[in-house]
Amino acid sequence: MTSLSSCWSWINPPQPTKYVTLGFQFPALSADEAKNAYLAAYYYDSPTTIKVLLQQPIGTPDYSNQNYSNPNPGGPQTSATLPLYGYEALLNADAKCSSPFVGGETKDRSNAVVTPSSVNTCNVYFAIYTNIGANKPDRSNRLYATNDFFGYASSDFTYSMAALDGKTSESGTRKLGWTLVRHTVLEPSAAPGTYLVTQNSAPDTDQALPIRLHAPTNGLISQNVQTWGHK
């Protein structure tokens, strides 16, 4: 009889076919605040229904692939990373994330011009929220958010539109596929009280630049806030 011996070795789990690791910066959360704080990537399954794609706690390390979400265990937290994957599944019919840009993102806007007008989009948003039973961010529990997002477009497209109150003009150029979409707001000195918003697909190299989370703001008139305090 032959004696067989087993040789155990650690096998790294397979990585998703597509994933990106995004970095975030945000105002300091104390160790106590971070206990119930979660960084979430979420999307809308309907115009009013939020579903979480991925989330992870701010107050504890993420040991996957030896990438630490918490660089300062036990101390104030000002940054985090989120390996983002699974977003391709959001294009399935069951996910209901992908929908026509015209009539969706152009809703409640005027003078919309979209080329081509048949484009579909799907957007993944980011927020830090206090998770006490809700398990997803909403207006009542969001600590910090960003107007940048990770989005899909079914084709290259350009668009322009305006807010109904006439104060904001918005335009953008987005690329086919999944891209990080950067949001900027300018208030021209020659026309105070009016705003120019752009939402453009950033180059892939921009994915290495941190995304700033801040107190939730109206993206039509504000890119950020003047102070880093809680809203």
Image (cartoon, rainbow, N blue to C red):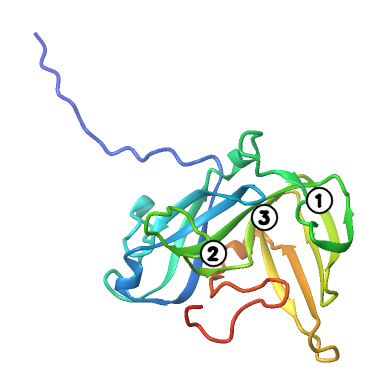
Q: Is residue 85 above or below residue 208?
A: above
Q: Which of marks 3 and 1 precedes in the sequence?
A: 1
User: Is label 1 in contact with label 3 (beta carbons under 8 Å)?
Assistant: no
Graded by Cα atoms within 10 Å as few (under 14), some (14 to 19) or many (20 or more), the crowding at tag 1 reads few
In the rendered image, which quarter contains the N terminus?
top left
Left or right, 57 with respect to 159, comes to left
Graded by Cα atoms within 10 Å as few (under 14), some (14 to 19) or many (20 or more), the crowding at tag 2 reads few
Left or right, 159 with respect to 224, comes to right
In x, y percent, where is residue 69? 39, 62
Q: Amino acid at mark 3?
A: Thr
Which residue shows up at 80% across the image and 76% down it?
196
In x, y percent, where is residue 12? 36, 40
Mark closer to the observer (3, 2) = 2
- Work out how far the residue at label 1 is from the one at label 2, CA to CA, in angstroms: 24 Å
- Work out how far the residue at label 3 is from the one at label 2, CA to CA, in angstroms: 26 Å
Which residue shows up at 35% across the image and 65% down it?
70
In x, y percent, where is residue 108? 79, 61
Q: Is residue 196 above or below residue 126?
A: below
Q: Residue furthest bottom?
A: 189
Residue holding disc 3: 179
User: Is label 1 in contact with label 2 (beta carbons under 8 Å)?
Assistant: no
Count the marks.
3
Question: Circle 3 — which element?
Answer: strand
Identify the mark at residue 139; answer none if there is no mark.
2
Residue holding disc 1: 103
User: Is label 3 in contact with label 2 (beta carbons under 8 Å)?
Assistant: no
Q: Amino acid at mark 1?
A: Gly
In x, y percent, where is residue 128? 47, 65
